[in-house]
Amino acid sequence: MLEVQNITKIYNPGTVMEHRLFQDFSLTVDEGQFVAIVGGNGSGKTSLLNIICGTIPLESGDVRIDGQSIAKRKDYQRYANMGRVYQNPSAGVCPNLTMLENLSLADNKGKPFNLTRAVNRSRVDFYRDQLRALDLGLEDKLDVRMGSLSGGQRQAVSLLMASMTPLRFLILDEHTAALDPKTAEIIMGLTDRIIREKSLTAMMVTHNLRHAVEYGDRILMMYQGSIVLDRAGEAKKNTSMDEILSMFNRISTQ
């Protein structure tokens, strides 16, 4: 279980640009939940992910996994059991390295860097099998540089890399926003499959309201650092696109 407990986050404290985004904000995500998070710009969606991942500090409050605080852990320490996919398809990969080299780096996550080759050739068949499962024809492009692939292909490989080693949490930060509609649908299908097959707890920030309604088993809508809608289970299944759009438009004009 992931808990965000009574957090306060202030940007630019003590200046004329001071902005208090979160004030005693709390959220609990149960094991195995797939949570879609929507809201306008500045509502706190990505800041929430950054706080959970440890990339921005807190003024007060706590982040806990299974009751144990991780608030003082560095981001790289938290990534021991977290994977993250970013909006920019290039952010989760090394574009000047080949796909094989990228996959090898992801495969070595958490392992000691000894005086051995970075690429383990004995794992090539495993990588091909993983890529073949994506059904994008990437299994024969292991020696192609990542920067030569399309944005959708890179994002698919980023998903694979983020979930390659054993982990519990998958953090998705608008990971389809930079893709064309057809590719975005492919990536969402892959996302849903990976989360279900690996029984991950997932949090997905998205501006695509339809994706938020159709995928996952819980939906949150945020506004100015607060949760204004929270539905899970049957309530989430019964939430319509029109209802979400109407509420989104209503709070956006306040």
Image: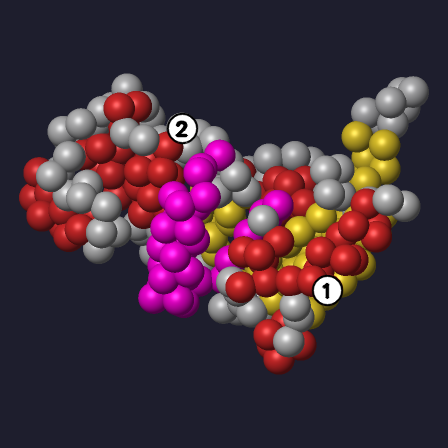
Q: Is residue 158 visible?
A: no
Type of residue at label 2?
Ser
Which residue in the protein does label 1 denote? 243
Q: CA distance from mark 2 to mark 1?
A: 34 Å
Pinpoint residue 120: horizontal percent, then vertical percent.
13, 38
Q: Is residue 210 visible?
A: yes
Judged left or right of residue 40, residue 238 is: left
How packed mark 1 is, by other alpha carbons closer than 10 Å (few <14, some 14-19, many 20 or more), is few
Type of residue at label 1?
Glu
Badge 1 marks a residue whose secondary structure is helix
Pinpoint residue 110: horizontal percent, then vertical percent.
34, 43
Judged left or right of residue 150, residue 49 is: right
Q: Tell me, yes or no, whether the highlighted magenta stretch contains residue 183.
A: yes
Pinpoint residue 115: horizontal percent, then vertical percent.
17, 28
Q: Height in image: 149 above or below 124?
A: above
Magenta residues, dominant SS class: helix
- Mark positioned earlier in the residue sequence (2 or 1): 2
Foreground of the two, 212 or 225: 212
Mark 2 and mark 1 residues within 8 Å of each other at the beta carbon: no
**Which span is picked out in magenta?**
178-207
Residue drawn at the location 33% of the way across and 35% of the way down: 154
Foreground of the two, 216 or 92: 216
Pinpoint residue 144: horizontal percent, then vertical percent.
18, 27
Residue drawn at the location 81% of the way across and 35% of the way down: 10
Badge 2 marks a residue whose secondary structure is loop
Which residue in the protein does label 2 denote? 90
How packed mark 2 is, by other alpha carbons closer than 10 Å (few <14, some 14-19, many 20 or more), is some
Residue drawn at the location 22% of the way across and 51% of the way down: 135
Position of the N terminus, as image quadrant, is bottom right
Q: Height in image: 140 above or below 211?
A: above
Looking at the rendered image, the disc whose residue lies closer to the viewer, 2 or 1, is: 1
